[in-house]
């Protein structure tokens, strides 16, 4: 048990990711008369960024912010649209993407720790993971939050955990990802550290944070585990209360008065990264294009404004650094799931 707590804490503190180098060997372009070199013509048509979830969650917000800034700053001169493809915490989309779109470099997607977890866990295992893609960049860092309705009887984290400990069947924890995946880990981590068997916690999964919040507001869940950045508007509207956040320090904005897990008496932390990925068989032209454009985007005032508006921390990693980090994190996720007896 002690090992599990240490592994969860270690893995959670680190969760952020990085990218592959180029993928395919296809060439696209025309001859540059002056330099005598092949000049890239990519992109030649509109681009799609997929959020593998419903609207309103962290993936959706990140995809839309990325598309917006790339367009507004004219860094990308082709139109960019965002599509939502919910199902299995991203696993349904990835299965299609890794097979049918493996060389479609006009379709990118947003993901986070579930791309590792879904591939490494035993139940509901996805045969596809980050190695079936080309990681392009890590964009943000976020944290988890435990959220209840404004009129919930749970006034703080301890009261919620006490109720779960007394009778786990009477408290429903929900999240926007499948059992064994990110929201589940965010929710059961404090329960485990509080002395509750994580396997006893009643967890219900939804396709994305937006659906999880809808379940909470509709009375179909008592608590949800979700991204801290996705609940601000509901807090402002007086619809929900945040019991605690998984950050190392208190967050700003509307969550400034919300305690961390540790401040609430539970020694645990969990960091959520989000990144952007392309197809495995991506051409060198396309890979180089996105490596350059995404770094440039991360340095714009427009992107910094999106970070502030959404309550995200800046955590940019280029393709090479992102891929290296993903390799390291995959090992840690396997250790975490092994401790939960949920590894494949």
Image (cartoon, rainbow, N blue to C red):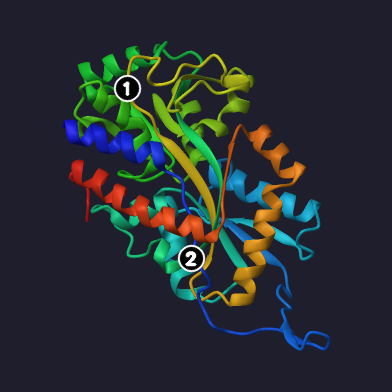
Residue 178: % across, % down: 36, 46
The N terminus sits in image quarter: top left
How many residues crowd mark 1 within 10 Å: few (<14), some (14–19), many (20+)? Answer: some
217 relative to 52, above or below: above
Of the pair 247 and 91, the residue shown nearer to us? 247
Who comes first in sequence, dot 1 or dot 2?
2
> In the rendered view, does 202 fall on the left or right side of 276?
left
Image x and y of residue 303, in percent: 71, 44
In the displayed structure, 199 sits above or below 255; it is below
Pointer 2 residue: 20
**Residue shown at 61% from the left, 32% from the top:** 311
Q: Is residue 211 visible?
A: yes
**Can residue 204 be seen in this snapshot?**
no
In the picture as drawn, the residue positioned furthest to the right comes out as 34
Of residues 204 and 316, the one nearer the viewer is 316
Residue 295 disc label: none
Q: Is residue 189 left or right of residue 278?
A: left
The residue singled out by tag 1 in the image is 267
Looking at the picture, how far across and down is residue 322, in whole percent? 49, 55
Secondary structure of residue under mark 2: loop
Real-space Cα separation, disc 1 to disc 2, in angstroms: 34 Å
Residue at (62% x, 59% y) in the render? 49
Compared with 318, 141 (above or below) is above
Q: Is residue 156 left or right of residue 302?
A: left
């Amino acid at each position: 048990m002690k090992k599990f707590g240490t592994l969860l804490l270690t893995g959670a503190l680190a969760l952020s990711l990085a990218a592959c180098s180029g993928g395919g060997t296809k060439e696209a372009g025309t001859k540059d008369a002056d330099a005598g070199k092949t000049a890239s013509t990519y992109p030649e048509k509109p681009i799609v960024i997929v959020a593998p979830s419903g609207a309103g969650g962290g993936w959706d917000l990140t995809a839309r912010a990325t598309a917006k800034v790339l367009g507004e700053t004219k860094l990308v001169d082709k139109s960019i649209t965002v599509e939502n493809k919910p199902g299995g915490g991203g696993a349904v989309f990835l299965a299609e993407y890794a097979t049918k779109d493996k060389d479609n470099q006009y379709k990118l997607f947003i993901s986070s720790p579930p791309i590792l977890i879904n591939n490494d866990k035993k139940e509901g295992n996805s045969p596809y993971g980050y190695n079936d893609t080309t990681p392009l960049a890590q964009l943000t860092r976020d944290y988890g939050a435990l959220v209840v309705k404004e009129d919930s009887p749970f006034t703080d984290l301890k009261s919620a955990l006490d109720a779960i400990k007394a009778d786990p069947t009477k408290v429903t924890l929900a999240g926007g990802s499948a059992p064994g995946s990110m929201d589940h880990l965010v929710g059961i981590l404090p329960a485990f550290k509080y002395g509750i068997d994580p396997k006893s916690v009643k967890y219900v999964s939804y396709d994305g944070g937006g659906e999880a919040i809808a379940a909470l507001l509709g009375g179909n869940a008592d608590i949800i585990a979700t991204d801290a950045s996705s609940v601000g508007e509901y807090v402002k509207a007086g619809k929900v209360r945040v019991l605690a956040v998984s950050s190392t320090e208190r967050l700003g904005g509307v969550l400034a008065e919300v305690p961390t897990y540790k401040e609430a008496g539970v020694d645990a932390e969990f960091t959520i990264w989000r990144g952007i990925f392309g197809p495995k068989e991506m051409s060198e032209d396309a890979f180089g294009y996105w490596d350059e454009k995404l770094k440039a985007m991360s340095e714009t005032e427009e992107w910094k404004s999106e970070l502030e508006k959404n309550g995200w921390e800046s955590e940019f990693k280029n393709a090479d650094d992102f891929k290296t980090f993903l390799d390291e994190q995959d090992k840690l996720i396997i250790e975490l799931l092994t401790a939960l007896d949920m590894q494949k």
